[in-house]
Image (spheres, helix red, strand yellow):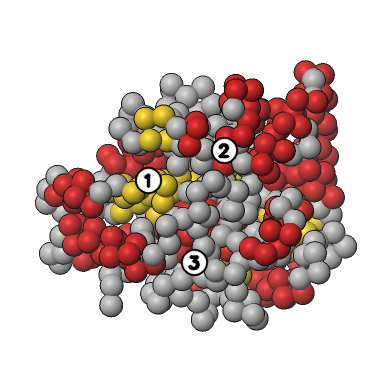
Amino acid sequence: MTLPLTIPALHAAYGAGTLPADVVAQVYARIAEVNDPGIFIHLLDQTEVTAAAEALGDFDPAKPLWGVPFAIKDNIDAGGKPTTAGCPAYAYIADQDAFVVAQLKKAGALLIGKTNLDQFATGLVGVRSPYAPPKNSVDPLIVPGGSSSGSGVAVGHGIVCFSLGTDTAGSGRTPAALNNIVGLKPTLGALSARGVVPACRTLDTVSIFALTVADAHAVFRAAAVYDAADSYARPIAAPAPSPVPPGLRIGIPSAASIKFFGDDVQAASFADAVKHLKATGAVVTEIDFATFYDAADMLYYGAWVAERYTVIGDLLKTNPDAIHPVTRKIITTAENLSAADAFRGMYRLKDLSRKAAPLLANVDMLCVPTIPTIYSVKDLADDPITPNNNLGTYTNFVNLMDMCGIAVPTRPRSDERPGSVTLLAAMGKDAQVAAVAMGFEGAAGGRMLGATSWPVPAPGTPSDAPDPGAIRVAVCGAHMSGLPLNWQLTDLGARFVRKASTTDAYRFYALAGGPPDRPGLVRSAPGTGAEIALEVWEMPLDRFGTFMKGIPAPLGIGTVALADGGAVHGFVCEAAGLDGARDITAAGDWRTHLAVGTA
């Protein structure tokens, strides 16, 4: 049996004496076995990769990607190698690695080659290429997904541990759904796009395909280095996924607005995924998705098509036949748009985002089908446009609305084709969606990794290790997960750590005033109170002052003694603030008080 290409398996093997050159040999043997010339546009010679592997020296577990083979989409630069963006007439030799590729190599990763794509990253199907399109790794009758087709297929076949794609309209998620793998679409600007051929520069992000959520997020953390030379880069924190808070509020498309285009098998698969969410204790809320669909439609029917035109406008004028016919048909619609149309599009998007804001304010994240249905290669031959548009139903709006997301496999559909959902949240919440995605991996019984025979490993464990650059705060009321003031934590980058309780030296009160209703935690003598339920959250130190500015008297931050013998900073109440308060110590938990109205 070949070595499973996951980071923990590789590093365990390296620690036991396996050489990275042996893994490189496995990679090239697997490429020969799969025998799909459509996966790679440029494959590095095995001797070159072996030399890079040998240059790593002794195994260094401090480098998170040491000896890990990867591939990149061929609109991302590798120094000294051609970049084609799926168009031979556009090709050039890159002077240096793209910034993100350089970060991955610095972390110890080994580049294997550059993968096929829908030309100029325009498409979600994976068959719009002048090169032979790659075959879907799970079922060659269905499309591989695009535009990052080769990147998704390479991971699906277990050729590489991870790969880079790009994502503007869903190109980092659709191939994941169709190849039974994970597709991580980061917050815009978290990964530098310097050295990447743009599709829509304002909306593009480098994306990550991997066999597991833990691997995808580990790659994200290694690559999420702020690049001041990229004018669209943003300094986005990349913490490890933390435990999932209780009572997480997750929005799904309402029964009246959800779309599967007649695919009852996909509908049943998504319903099963929703059952899993509810079983974990999540509070699932149906949302009318009409606003999100309206935003999705703007990506290919408005000003953002003109942004694609800026990339290849000169080539269209001098050599239009070099452009794939379908790609050319889509992008040349920009020739009928004016600057006024661009501004109208921006105004409409702003209106739709404002309309969506109250829907999103009531949930912590969204869970959607990654794709509404599955299309065959024949479907695309018969109609190259409609299936592609339909595949973007739940992906096109995401970058327009500045959200992050991760596509994760679920249990196989009843027809044995891959199941997949995508978790979406506001910018900067990449770790939160990854943590919830790990739960799907643990529940996806009967699934192998991609198209391989490798079993799904135990899901990654979200980290509760303390961050030296953060402060831990215990909350016991409206700031708890799912309650009205939790946003004051999450909007400042706080992450849930764990549930806890105080010692029995505390009394608990429902304070006068509101809304929102607030509790007061008051320390008394040991044994004269009760153990009061808490949640421990961790907040960046540089944002703690901002948080405290919003905390009104009589509440403040003190040291709270925990039942497990520890202590943590937490909300406490001044005795003077108990005028008109009700003693709810017997409830022991603010949620219990809210549910039963303890007197």
- Looking at this view, is 124 or 236 the one in front? 124
Q: Is mark 1 on a helix, strand or loop?
A: strand
Please tell me in which quadrant of the rendered image residue 294 appears: top right
- Which residue corresponds to the image point at 73% horizontal and 59% vertical from the top-left? 382
The residue type indicated by label 2 comes to Phe
Which amino acid does the dot numbered 3 rest on? Ser
The residue tagged 3 is 137
- Label 3: state its secondary structure: loop
Contact (Cβ within 8 Å) of mark 3 with mark 1: no
Where is residue 132 shown, x and y percent of the image? 50, 54
> Residue 529, position in %: x, y?
57, 64
Residue 141, image quadrant:
bottom right
Quadrant location of the C terminus in the rendered image:
bottom right
Left or right for 100, reference 417: left
Q: Note whether 366 is above or below 48 in the view shown.
A: below
Quick one: label 2 or label 3, which is nearer the N terminus?
2
Checking the image for residue 42, the label placed there is: 1
